[in-house]
Image (cartoon, grey):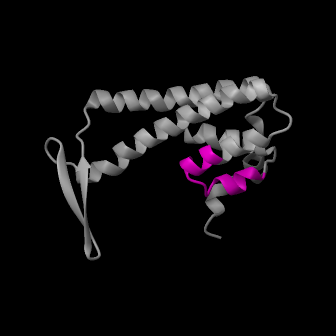
Amino acid sequence: MERVLRTAFSALVGSKYAAVVDGRLSTAALIEDCQRITRYHTTIPQAAKEPIWTALKACHEANRDRNRVIHDTWATRPGSATVTLHRGRTPHDVTVAVRTLNEVRHLAEQLADAAHELRAAMAAALGPDWAVLEDQLRQELGRDVNADLDR
């Protein structure tokens, strides 16, 4: 899903140089930026914007659920449990829920479905070649732009 979001961001911005920026954006920031760009995009008809927003909403929900699974797993205990995190002088209680394998599989399907929905909405709005722009700079340089982030 994140890869499709980066491609959508570049297509919405309309520049191969968007890949320079999107490499440092979190998934949540990509979703929010794509929503905002879509709102103000003057060449996408309103009727084509609605499916993009719907797909981005699905991406937001899938990303939220993914974050709960990924970021809560470090505190796994048998069964559901409450763990106290000590941060400075103020402790925080966090309830950690155990996830079943079927729940994790469902989450993987949710992520894949959201990516597919966004791909379809972008193709309907911008045409079948909408995804070409994102890879253009990488092809010209012969490497991934994100590899240069430390420079």
Q: Is residue 6 toward the left or the right of residue 72 in the image? A: right
Is the residue 117 above or below the residue 38 in the image? above
User: How far across and down, in percent of the image, does residue 123 sit?
Assistant: 73, 26
Q: Is residue 128 visible?
A: no
Closer to us: 71 or 85:
85
Asked which quadrant contains residue 106, the reply is: top left
Q: Is residue 40 toward the left or the right of residue 143 in the image? A: right
Is the residue 146 above or below the residue 130 in the image? below
Q: Quadrant of the C terminus?
A: bottom right
Which segment is the magenta one?
A: 17-32
Closer to us: 35 or 8:
35
Residue for point 65% across, 63% down: 148
Q: Quadrant of the N terminus?
A: top right
Residue for point 41% across, 46% down: 67
Residue 83 in magenta?
no
Q: Is residue 30 toward the left or the right of residue 91 in the image? A: right
Is the residue 85 above or below the residue 130 in the image? below
Residue for point 81% across, 47% down: 15
Residue for point 69% across, 56% down: 21
Closer to us: 136 or 40:
40
Q: Is residue 27 toward the left or the right of residue 99 in the image? A: right
User: How far across and down, in percent of the image, does residue 83 sit?
Assistant: 20, 56
User: How far across and down, in percent of the image, does residue 85 sit?
Assistant: 24, 63
Residue that lies at the very extreme toward the right in this rendered image: 43
Q: How many marks?
A: 0
Q: Examine the residues drawn in magenta and state their main secondary structure.
A: helix
